[in-house]
Amino acid sequence: MTEGLQPGRSDTGKRYEVFHTDCAARDTVDHVTSRWGVWVLISLQGNDLRFYELRDSIRGISEKMLAQTLRTLVQDGLVWRTVEPTTPPQVTYGLTEFGRDVGEPLLELFDRITRWLPPGTADRTPADGSRPRS
């Protein structure tokens, strides 16, 4: 089942054993594929956004979870963060080259999934009246 997957190599030539728990890339993969990491990377594909714009674009995410997710993605080098010295400070986020490269296939995956959904599925409202998660 895993025959097609090969361990990668870093720029230094060190092998990454993708199925080993100590793999250096594994934490980044976990952050990217986390519940909110995917949506942050997709949301930032189009434009750099301020914190509140990101929060408003990702329905259902709390400010705490957004801040936590952004912190890990910044640490992983996928997202950059700029703070403008205003009162209150204006914080803007965008994708690094690495983040853009990782985020593009996620956006493509999302597009493929939505193309295959039955008509009207994306528009439906849950029975409890809440908005669908996006």
Image (spheres, helix red, strand yellow):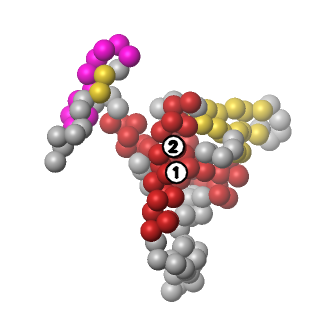
Number of other residues with Cα within 10 Å of mark 1, as a class: few under 14, some 14 to 19, many 20 or more: some
SS assignment at label 1: helix
Q: Which amino acid does label 1 sit on?
A: Leu
Q: Give the range drawn in magenta.
A: 11-21
Q: Residue at x 69, y 32 (%)?
A: 82
Residue 115 position (above or below residue 90): below
Image vertical order of residue 125 relative to residue 23, above or below? below
The residue sitting at 78% across, 32% down in the picture is 84
As shown in the figure, which amino acid type bears the numbered disc 2? Gly
Query: Label 2 crowding class (10 Å Cα cut-off): few <14, some 14-19, many 20+?
Result: many
Rendering coords of residue 19 (x, y %)? 22, 37
As drawn, the residue found furthest toward the right would be 87
Task: Kindly indicate whether the residue at mark 1 contacts the one at mark 2 (C-beta within 8 angstroms).
Answer: yes
Q: Residue 103 carries which label?
A: 2
Q: Where is residue 101 in the image (x, y as percent from the top left)?
A: 51, 36
Side of 129 relative to 26 (left or right):
right
What's the residue at 51%, 86% (across, down)? 127
Disc 2 to disc 1, C-alpha distance: 6 Å
Q: Give 78 or 105, whichever is nearer the viewer.
A: 105
Taking the image as shown, residue 74 lies to the left or right of residue 49, namely left
Residue sitting at 51 percent across and 43 percent down? 103
- Residue 107's mark? 1
